[in-house]
Amino acid sequence: MTYAGNKKNLSGLPADRVELVVGDITDAELVYQLVKEADAVVHYAAESHNDNSLNDPFPFVQTNIIGTYTLLEACRKYGVRYHHVSTDEVYGDLPLREGLSGKGEGPGEKFTPETPYNPSSPYSSTKAGSDLLVRAWVRSYGLKATISNCSNNYGPYQHIEKFIPRQITNILSGMRPKLYGDGKNVRDWIHVDDHSAAVWTILMNGRIGETYLIGADGERNNSDVLELILELMGQPKDAYDCVKDRAGHDLRYAIDSTKIREELGWTPQFTDFRDGLADTIKWYTENRDWWAAEKEAVEAKYAKNNQ
Ligand SMILES: Cc1cn([C@H]2C[C@H](O)[C@@H](COP(=O)(O)OP(=O)(O)O[C@H]3O[C@H](C)C(=O)[C@H](O)[C@H]3O)O2)c(=O)[nH]c1=O
């Protein structure tokens, strides 16, 4: 199997059965050469960070649209099975629920595979575009492909630009965590290993042409997540800064993952967010070498936007 992606996301896939390929997916010559030899392609190789897409959308159009197109064409040419890793953000956002405890309890509307696409940011609109390319390649050319749309991941090896690792590494670097706006925005958290296991399940048993939503019923608002990080790291509850909100900030994401659970028998294994977060903190604490060199540059980018 050829895996187009980023080594940092490999956690959970059986390494002996996967050949990791990191490269420029807009480089058609490279892509065709690799896909020719592959049994299957799992495409994780997106530009993925909303804040970066707001500052500079072009790499998102190039990688997420042209890169996906290039992979699809190569898979079509060589008859290779393709799985497209995507995001719940293609569906836009949901209204905040009154009284959300931050523990994912209670009823509320969630995204389903039938929810109409309504992306908000340059990032999510390019992911939506790439999903639609996949659907067109299935219908028009009979490409053997599946799509998954997952909620917010957390766990080891996540880029420190993202919310959870940013706050952990801020604290470890003697800086205060940064919360956008009022911190009431809700994300539906899933451990990266559960996401990887779900992708593997779809690749092995998913029906061609289908879209599966992946989520672990992990809704929490950002303030609650940050307060838990502060508590687990022995910091005062209020030791953070509220900073400028993200432009067009999506309010709430929530996934209904009934389809993958009932049809393919997948269930998340990381059901205790507190434990998963504690392990994640431990990982960043013990692996400073992995992130420390990048910290200054990441924070300088945020500082330019007063974030
Ligand atoms: C970096 C940062 C973020 N935030 C807020 C903004 C969001 O409400 C939440 C999570 O932000 P993050 O940028 O980590 O993730 P999302 O914008 O929700 O998107 C992520 O999850 C989806 C599914 C993908 O598809 C994206 O690829 C992935 O980046 O924390 C803060 O309050 N402070 C911060 O310093």
Image: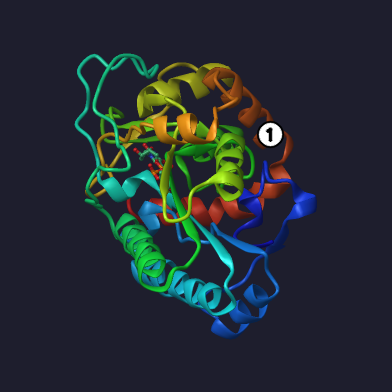
Task: Identify the image's colour scheme: rainbow, by chain, secondary structure or one colour.
Answer: rainbow
Quick check: can you spot residue 176?
Answer: no
Assign ligand 1 to one image quadrant: top left
- Viewer-closest of 64 and 282: 64
In this view, 214 is above or below 130: above
Q: Residues within 10 Å of mark 1 (few under 14, many from 20)?
A: some
Give the image location of residue 99, x and y in percent: 24, 14
Quick check: can you spot residue 131?
Answer: yes
**Residue sitting at the far right:** 16
Residue drawn at 36 percent across, 31 percent down: 256
In this view, 110 is above or below 203: above
For disc 1, does the CB lie below 8 Å from ligand 1? no
Q: How many marks?
A: 1
SS of the residue under disc 1: helix
In the image, taking residue 235 as reference, residue 250 lies left or right, namely left
Quadrant of the snapshot with the N terminus: bottom right
Give the image location of residue 172, x and y in percent: 61, 34
Residue drawn at 60 percent across, 80 percent down: 32
Q: Amino acid at mark 1?
A: Trp
Give the image location of residue 23, x and y in percent: 62, 71
- Viewer-closest of 102 and 68: 68
Q: Which residue is mark 1?
A: 283
Residue 30 in which image quadrant:
bottom right
In the image, taking residue 75 as reference, residue 141 lies left or right, namely left
In the image, taking residue 143 as reference, residue 254 lies left or right, namely left
In this view, 83 is above or below 189: below
Give the image location of residue 170, x and y in percent: 53, 37
Residue drawn at 32 percent across, 64 percent down: 129
- Viewer-closest of 122 and 110: 110
